Image: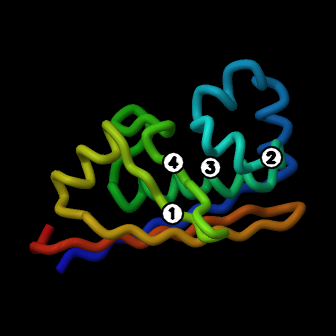
């Protein structure tokens, strides 16, 4: 069995300043329409989702360049976050045999954090 983890933490005020400086490009480039809609424009929610993207890339052992962050989507279903992997993220996960994903998000006014667990068969 393969087990991979990733964790990431964001400083929300710093993250907010970065997003506001690049607002026109940044949000549409790195978050899906579902993520933008479900975050309701709350920087804490976008920061937690960014943390999930980073944590997923760590579990994949691949950073930006190999994985397009928009290929990792955090979708809330019945209030529970789920990861949807597409294109570059899906291809790497498939090559590693990672088929089951779990994500946990938390945030307050100052920090947003995500923890990701991936599992699969084989010895990868």
In the image, residue 42 above or below residue 96:
above
**Residue 10, quarter of the rendered image:** bottom right
Question: Which residue carries the number 4 mark?
Answer: 73
> Does label 1 or label 4 sit earlier along the sequence?
4
Q: Is residue 93 left or right of residue 16?
A: left
Q: CA distance from mark 3 to mark 1?
A: 14 Å
Label 3 or label 2, whichever lies nearer to me, is 2
Q: CA distance from mark 2 to mark 1?
A: 17 Å
Q: Are there few (<14), some (14-19), or many (20+) residues within 10 Å of tag 1?
A: some
Q: Are there few (<14), some (14-19), or many (20+) residues within 10 Å of tag 2?
A: few
Q: Residue at x 50, y 37 (%)?
A: 70
Question: Which residue carries the number 1 mark?
Answer: 82
Numbered label attached to residue 40: 2
Quadrant of the drawing holding the N terminus: bottom left
Q: Residue at x 51, y 48 (%)?
A: 73
Question: Which residue carries the number 3 mark?
Answer: 50
Q: Position of residue 78 (x, y in %)?
A: 62, 69
Q: Position of residue 25 (x, y in %)?
A: 68, 20
Q: Residue at x 85, y 37 (%)?
A: 17
Q: Secondary structure at mark 2?
A: loop
Q: Secondary structure at mark 4?
A: strand
Q: Position of residue 91 (x, y in %)?
A: 24, 44
Q: Residue furthest top?
A: 24
């Amino acid at each position: 069995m393969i087990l991979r983890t990733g964790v990431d933490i964001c400083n929300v005020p710093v993250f907010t300043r970065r997003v506001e400086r690049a607002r026109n490009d940044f949000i549409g480039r790195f978050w899906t329409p579902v993520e933008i809609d479900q975050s309701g424009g709350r920087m804490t929610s976008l920061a937690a989702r960014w943390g999930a993207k980073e944590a997923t890339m760590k579990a994949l052992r691949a950073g930006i360049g190999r994985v397009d962050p928009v290929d990792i989507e955090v979708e809330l279903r019945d209030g529970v976050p789920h990861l949807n992997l597409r294109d570059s993220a899906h291809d790497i996960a498939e090559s590693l045999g990672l088929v089951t994903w779990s994500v946990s998000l938390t945030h307050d006014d100052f920090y947003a954090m995500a923890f990701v667990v991936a599992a699969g068969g084989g010895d990868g």
